[in-house]
Amino acid sequence: MGKTSRIAPPTRPFEEIDPRLRGLVSFFNRAGPATVQSCEGHDPNYLGYVEFTPVFFKENMAALKKVCETFEERRIYTEQKVWVREGENALFFHLEPMNGEDAMGLLLAVIGEEFDADERWQTIIRSGEIPDQEEI
């Protein structure tokens, strides 16, 4: 299971974070900085990523690798991929939409599960909503 003992508001306004990743970034940054930058992946190549601080990445490497394994087991299309790059402290994903499949939604759900998000945080992660300051 991943560690989620960190969290603080991001260093940039929530509005500048890609909408589908706002809840996830909030979740990871609850106690202190865990993420450095992120991108949900846009047309034409749909390559997205979440880059983590070196400390958070090292502490959570096993959980991030498990996210990749679980996503691979549950995905519908083999073209949709998730992988970890140790030298870059990042979780990368290629989630080109196919036949209406919400691969990003699946990835967000798997991350929430692996990092033991409670039901409220699962909802925030999947929806991309910005949590109230009191929740952070």
Image (tube, rainbow, N blue to C red):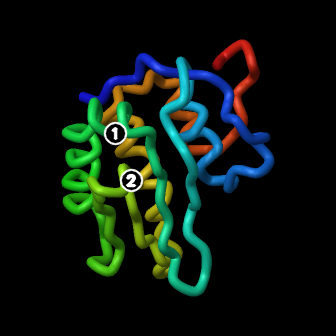
> Which label number is shown at residue 121?
none
Q: Residue 133 in the image: state x and y as whole percent.
A: 75, 19
Q: Which structural element holds mark 1?
A: helix
- Image-based side of 9 in relation to 116, left or right: right
Write down the residue under mark 1: 57
Residue at 61% over, 39% down: 23
Q: Residue 93 in the image: state x and y as whole percent.
A: 40, 65
* Quarter assignment of residue 52: top left
- Image-based side of 84 in relation to 56, left or right: left
Amino acid at pointer 2? Ala
Amino acid at pointer 1? Phe
Q: Residue 50 in the image: state x and y as whole percent.
A: 48, 52
Q: Judge by depth and name the residue closer to the eye, 94 or 117.
A: 94
Q: Which structural element holds mark 2?
A: strand
* Of the image marks 2 and 1, the number of the one nearer the N terminus: 1
Disc 2 + disc 1, Cβ < 8 Å: yes
Write down the residue under mark 2: 90
Residue 2 drawn above or below residue 72 = above
Residue at 50% over, 65% down: 48
- Image-based side of 11 in relation to 99, left or right: right
Residue 47 drawn above or below residue 102 = below
* Quarter assignment of residue 56: top left
